[in-house]
Image (spheres, grey):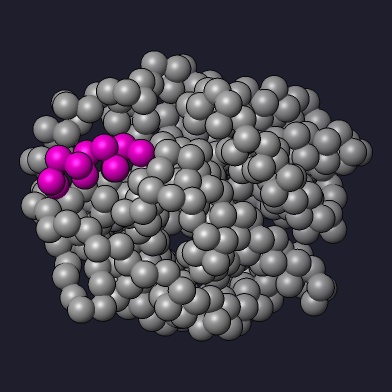
């Protein structure tokens, strides 16, 4: 691992793969549930249940992908072959997912969403683990994570702009088709830049670990469990609004035509805020900076349940303020995780892939909970997108704006006790 300042070319080459992954991630989390509920005709309860079950498989597959990636050795490197294979799985399975069969739709959604999430894991887990091996410097890891997350935001913004430019942003079916083509083009352009632009560091031969060693690691490094728990709760707080965004803007604010501009505002705000959080992390540390971002987002979002039709301007202000915290949520937790990986790797054990596998699993488990909690509760109160009742709209507002604040405050309380030196 290198201790000097990373070159800009290294940052750029590493970060480029984040663009296609983000362009795929946005439709998965925002458009796909709406597509299957509105265009395909499944009930919101069934969509929530199936996606929840499919994402639950990541509880098993993500740690396993990380575990076997740590043990994998080839003349082409440890991380790169996994990323290439995962990209092929994504290309095939995502195409099938957005072109469902007319029969057995529930099983089609379940099977191919499981394959998409598996392909995503095979790409993203080695990609994240690689970041802990490119540099061992405390602040350079933040720069590397920050570069990756800036490109992630740029990819997400591109995914928003493309359907908007083609005038299909309000049509989940058309948007998914366009975004698949965008993913196809960018993965062929960006992945080679990462593969050939960044060399895998020569990591000393280490002992592969299993789940038994992981349990011992949790006991030896108690702050690791605290970090992972806080990260999952904070991810859940972010996933609920992402899952319910289209329904909230269309039905509560009644501003369906503004979904694209509002999402662009949110991600643009995230780009603006990221340099500030990076600078703040250098001054007061990553943990305190992340805590500050949680407080800022919560103070803004606590007003969301009180909004209704005609409050677009207030919602835009809240979107901008909460978006400022996006950069911190994306860059700082993974950078803290990379610090932990570096510390435990020095003990001659290969933990990077396994720990980032668990990291990815927690992210997707939070998304699964968001879909499960959101859609199942909405289904329980009789939510119908075409004719929503007053109770359904109130429940939607509380799920979209109230519940995330509660989860974020739990994450804040847990992360307060995190000790970077343990």
Q: Tell me if residue 347 is in the magenta stretch.
A: yes
Residue 421 seen by the camera: yes
Residue 233 versus residue 31 in the image, above or below: above
For the stretch drawn in magenta, the main secondary structure is helix
Q: Quadrant of residue 195?
A: bottom left
Q: Which residues are magenta?
A: 339-349
Relative to the observer, which residue lies in front, 49 or 238?
Answer: 238
Q: Residue at x 67, y 66 (%)?
A: 159
Relative to the observer, which residue lies in front, 354 or 42?
Answer: 354
Q: Tell me if residue 415 is in the magenta stretch.
A: no
Residue 280 versus residue 355 in the image, above or below: above
Residue 357 seen by the camera: no
Q: Residue at x 49, y 55 (%)?
A: 6
**Residue 417 shown left or right of residue 24 in the figure:** left
Q: If the image is split into quadrants, where does the C terminus sit?
A: top left
How many marks do you count on the picture?
0
Q: If the image is split into quadrants, where does the N terminus sit?
A: bottom left
Q: Quadrant of residue 24?
A: bottom right
């Amino acid at each position: 691992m290198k201790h000097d300042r990373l070159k800009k070319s290294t940052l750029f080459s590493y970060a480029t793969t984040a663009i296609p992954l983000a362009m795929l991630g946005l439709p998965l989390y925002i458009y796909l549930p709406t597509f299957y509920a509105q265009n395909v005709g499944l009930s919101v309860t069934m969509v929530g249940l199936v996606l929840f079950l499919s994402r639950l498989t990541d509880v098993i597959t993500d740690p396993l992908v990380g575990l076997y990636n740590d043990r994998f050795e080839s003349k082409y490197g440890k991380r790169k072959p996994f990323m290439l294979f995962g990209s092929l799985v994504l290309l095939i399975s995502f195409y099938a997912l957005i072109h469902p069969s007319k029969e057995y739709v529930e099983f089609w959604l379940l099977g191919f969403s499981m394959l998409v999430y598996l392909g995503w894991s095979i790409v993203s887990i080695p990609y994240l683990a690689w970041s802990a091996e490119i540099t061992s410097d405390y602040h350079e890891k933040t720069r590397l994570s920050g570069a990756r997350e800036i490109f992630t935001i740029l990819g997400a913004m591109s995914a928003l702009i493309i359907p908007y430019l083609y005038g299909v942003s309000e049509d989940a079916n058309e948007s998914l088709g366009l975004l698949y083509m965008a993913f196809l083009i960018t993965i062929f352009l960006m992945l080679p830049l990462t593969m050939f632009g960044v060399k895998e560091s020569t990591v000393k031969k280490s002992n592969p670990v299993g789940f038994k060693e992981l349990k011992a690691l949790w006991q030896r490094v108690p702050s690791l469990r605290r970090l992972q728990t806080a990260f999952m709760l904070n991810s859940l707080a972010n996933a609920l609004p992402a899952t319910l965004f289209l329904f909230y803007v269309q039905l509560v604010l009644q501003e369906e035509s503004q979904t694209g501009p509002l999402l662009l505002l949110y991600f643009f705000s995230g780009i603006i805020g990221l340099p500030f959080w990076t600078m703040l992390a250098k001054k007061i540390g990553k943990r305190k900076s992340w805590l500050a971002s949680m407080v800022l987002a919560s103070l803004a979002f606590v007003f969301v349940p009180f909004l209704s039709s005609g409050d677009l301007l207030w919602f835009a202000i809240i979107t901008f303020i909460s978006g400022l915290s996006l950069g911190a949520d994306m860059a700082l937790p993974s950078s803290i995780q990379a610090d932990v990986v570096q510390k435990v790797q020095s003990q001659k054990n290969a933990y990077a892939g396994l720990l980032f596998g668990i990291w990815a699993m927690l992210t997707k488990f939070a998304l699964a909970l968001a879909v499960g909690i959101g859609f199942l509760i909405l289904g329980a109160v009789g939510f119908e997108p075409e004719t929503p009742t007053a109770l359904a709209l109130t429940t939607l507002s509380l799920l979209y704006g109230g519940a995330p604040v509660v989860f974020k405050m739990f994450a804040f309380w847990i992360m307060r006790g995190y000790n970077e030196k343990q």
